[in-house]
Amino acid sequence: MKKYLLFLGCLTAISAHAQQDKKQKLTTLKEEKAVVTGFLKNAPNDSIITLYEPYSGEVDTAFIKNQRFTLNMPMPKGGSMYILKVGRNPDPKTGGMILYLESGKMHIEGNGTTLKNVKLSGDKWAKEWMEVADFLDESKGSGKILAETKAKYFKAMEIGDEDAADEYNRVGDSLMKIQNRKIRSFIQSHPNSGVTGYLATCYIKNRKERDSIVAGMGEHAKSSRIMKRFLFPGKYDPRPMTLSVDTASTPSGKKGVITIGKAAPDFSVPDTDGKMLSLADFKGKYLFIDFWASWCSPCKPQIPFLKAANEKFKDKNFVMLAVSLDSKKEAWTKAIEKHELTWLNASHLKGWAEPVAVAYGISAIPSNVLIGPDGTVLAMGLYGDMIEKQLEALIK
């Protein structure tokens, strides 16, 4: 189920953290290059403006003089996506923008240093990116409504108001369909644009559809740096920098690894009443651990299958334990009550830093692990009717 993912942007959900000692100042004059000029009304003199490629860390900088600037980015490998920022530590919500660049010229006009509502002109590819950026922009039109709906959705899930979240989800889904139609329309009408490579590899999730789009691309589109990385992963353009997802609750410790046939990691976790539960408490029983959260939309379709399995095997030396990756107790307990989760429920309420999830190497939810009476891992990643089928094969 993809509903929970509908709000996730392609580059906005990930912050690129380039290691400063690996950023390269490119100055080769013989290479083809993108020349980006700009006029930012009311921008203070000597404000630094930075253009960098988040994949490789390649960078160019300039100082704004008389509200104008010029950046020169060598293009030795074709068109790619870049981030433009004003200031040394600009607010990521107001101080940057994403650009598609290839060899040629682009001119930017705007007001101040926020880079919001700017106008782009220049070569054909610059105008093509302006067309796409216009309907992807979260500061205006349907893009703004989508961004606001996203914020309301996550706020509702944070406080456990699933009814409101479902409504925001419905509205967001409708807006995403509109945006996706615009994306597909651009791709269809611009088969030889480098921008099409970005849209196809970033926004088209269906592999068959994406492969069909790639097959129909012109040679110019396929020659972009974006497409070369996509077609030849890890070979064409090795990544010399670190990418990390900004998550306040991400654990700093190393995730555990579990293996079928090996002993399951021990754990200690409080239930809804604060009583501590450990793996030893379930010795001699089959233990099914389900990792979920109240805000996890893809977890909801699993609930009927979990209920069916629990009802069928709860009196047959079987225990179901749901470990939540929630961080708010009210949201957690409301979801338990609303969905009538009658099995054991436990959580440290530390989000993705939940110690049991870390110990079991959980990086996505829903996830689950089946442990045998002797503490051995018997299965993992059981979904739908496979839960009941696996239990039927083991529990006679």
Image: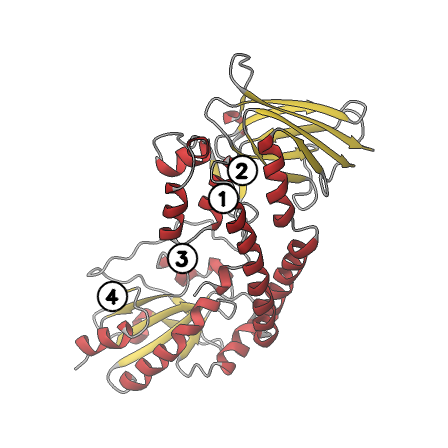
Q: Distance between the residues labelled 4 and 3?
A: 18 Å
Q: Is mark 3 on a helix, strand or loop?
A: helix
* Residue tagged 1: 244
Q: Look at the image and tell me in which quarter the C terminus lies.
A: bottom left
Name the quadrant containing residue 233. Answer: top left
Q: Which amino acid does label 3 sit on?
A: Val
* Residue tagged 2: 17
Q: Which of 250 and 312 is in front in this view?
A: 312
Q: What residue type is labelled 4?
A: Ala
* Residue tagged 3: 358
Q: Is mark 4 on a helix, strand or loop?
A: strand
Label 3: few (<14), some (14–19) or many (≥20) C-alpha neighbours in 10 Å: some
Query: Image point 70% across, 52% down: which residue?
Result: 140
Q: How far apart are marks 4 and 1 (CA)?
A: 30 Å
How far from the left and from the top, in percent, is residue 22?
50, 26
Going from the N terminus, do you reach mark 2 or mark 1 first?
2
Going from the N terminus, do you reach mark 2 or mark 3 first?
2
Cβ atoms at labels 4 and 1 below 8 Å apart: no
How far from the left and from the top, in percent, is residue 244?
49, 44
Q: Is mark 2 on a helix, strand or loop?
A: strand
* Residue tagged 4: 379
Mark 3 or 1: the one toward you: 1
Going from the N terminus, do you reach mark 4 or mark 3 first?
3
Q: How far apart are marks 3 and 1 (CA)?
A: 17 Å
